[in-house]
Amino acid sequence: MSSATPTPGPSPVRRLSLAGVLRLRRPSEIWFKPALSSVAAVAPPNLLLLAFGRLDLAMYTMAGSLCALYAHNRPYAARARTLAWVVLGMLGGVAVALVTASLTRDAVVLVTVGALLAAVQKALCDAGRVGPPGNVILTFISSAALFAPQTLAQIPGHLALAAAAGVWAWLVGMAPALVRPHGPERRATAQALNAAAAYAATRGTGDGHASARAAGYAAVQAAWQTLLSLPATGARAATRHALERLVVRAEVALAAPADTDPERLRAWAHALRGGGRIPRTGDAPADGDELLGVDAELAARPAPLWRRLGPLAPIAVRTGLGCALAGYASLALGIGRPYWALVTAAALYQANLTLTWSRAVQRVVGNLAGVLLFAAIAPLAHLAQVLLVLCCLALNFGAEALITRNYWLGSVCVTPMALLVTEFAGYQAPGDLMTERAVDTLVGALVGFLAAVVVTNRRAGNRVEQAVTAADRARERAARLLAEPSPAPGDLEAARRSLAAALTDLRATADAAAGEWWGRALPQERVVLAEQSGHRTLAEAVRRQAARPDRDTGTRTEDVRP
């Protein structure tokens, strides 16, 4: 373990920067899939309700339909489980909201319950890495349900509508498996190859090499998590093993960027985008056609839920307090829909305070622009209910298509859609809706961010210390194996991957802690030394594995169809 010590003294207070907050990014590679899935999940229930003249029930069907927004990056076996849990979580939140709404109409109680639900939803989604869109959709639906007039006798029917729409959303989310059953894992592998190629292009010393290396290891780690969620035997195993060898080549490129041809990595990534054969690296299969070390990773159980929830306690407290105060402030101002302020606050909270500030700016800009867009759309939507539904579907598509460019751009479509949905039950005066939404946005963003400032995350520094210790231990284990004349290949491979995962976690933890304000000083020297020594050991381990006599350097094509 490094002997470096933390820098003494308090951390400086950071400026509220606006640089880059509204900058547009490249769209997601699969931006159209969540957008199309959302429309396919929402349209049939809404059109059926329109045909039966019960568009006022659309809130309950949308609770289930919007579950189709989740898990698009996961392999289909994992997606099936995740979508099922999202639907159950949605139904649970709606059930609590409806029961509360049927028992009391006290607005303070409703806001309090909504804030508690938001905190629970935030913690569970972050712990389970359910996202995007994370907890925001769940909180939006459950908060709106709290303020919908309700009786106990109506609850079973309303929950049945949500459940039926949830089942339909699950089917929509799983439908692409019929066309490209290996699409998610191929995309994850391609992203790892492209990220490794970007680092290799810097030769390990060029401009931006540090950030490119961190991005490369994060993409490789994500690819391993995706591949290891697939079955190791059966019909899909051959595809998984072929993709594993490509991820190994990405790891080799990260360890030896100067000796890597980035164009070859990009060519492999490009070949994975279609439906053709998976390119073969030329690495010979390991014993039993199983890459060394994979069994060890499969045997490792994930941390228990309570351990994953522990570090999220400050974020959950921020969410609960911020949502409650935002809702109370809206009530004090006499706004008729305090859940808008509550949801605005819930949408702000990110991994640290700096990111929360950026999201607050994006939310305000997007919502206010969305209010102006609603003013332009409302006259057309009010001509007929079918136009109201079609406008909502178009905005739904636009929101999911644009939100990957920047959150504020997606909010420009989300805001008028939410305003139009309130009119499913009857005409609302556009001026009143626009005023209330604008005020609630400003109140929710201001109060929510102030709550985040008050609730400091003092555990951030401790988590960095723990991540440094874990990285040091993983490096020492790998170094011991490298010092042996003939270490067991499986042990060395497992140690190498454990070290790569520890370094990725260390960088993510350090970045998250650096974005907190007024915390104690971070052990920057230890972080730098742990990363430097860890990456040197990792590179040596990768070179040792790559030099095994059962590997060659050909570039044939494996006859594995998607």
Image (cartoon, rainbow, N blue to C red):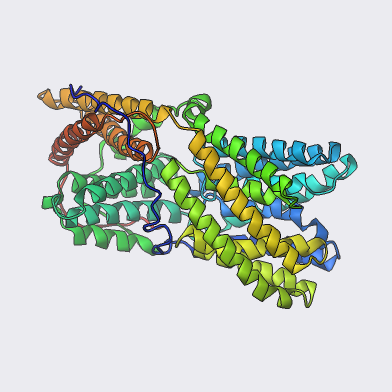
Q: Answer yes or no: is residue 248 visible.
A: yes
Marker count (numbered): 0
Spot occupied by residue 449 in the image (x, y as percentages of width and height):
52, 44
Image position of 376 (left or right of 519): right
Q: Is residue 171 above or below residue 369?
A: above
Quarter of the image for the N terminus: give it: top left
Residue 398, how many percent across, how many down?
56, 67
Q: Is residue 88 above or below residue 440?
A: above
Residue drawn at the location 67% of the way across and 58% of the way down: 437
Please tell me which residue lies in front, 536 or 261.
Answer: 536
Percent x, y of residue 551: 17, 44
List x then y, in percent, for residue 133: 54, 50
3 over 191 or under it: above or below: above
User: Viewed as shown, does residue 392 lie left or right of 81?
Assistant: right
Using the image, determine if residue 236 lies above or below residue 439.
Answer: above
Give the residue drawn at x 36%, y 39%: 13
- Which is more toward the observer, 453 or 224? 453
Residue at the (23%, 56%) spot, across then down: 197
Quarter of the image where the C terminus is located: bottom left
Q: Nearer the viewer, residue 232 or 74?
A: 74
Task: Kindly indicate the quadrant of the structure image that contains residue 386.
Answer: bottom right
Residue toward you, 293 or 269:
269
Q: Residue furthest front?
A: 333
Q: Is residue 44 visible?
A: no
Residue located at (71% from left, 49% from top): 333
Q: From the viewer's perspective, is 272 left or right of 92?
A: left
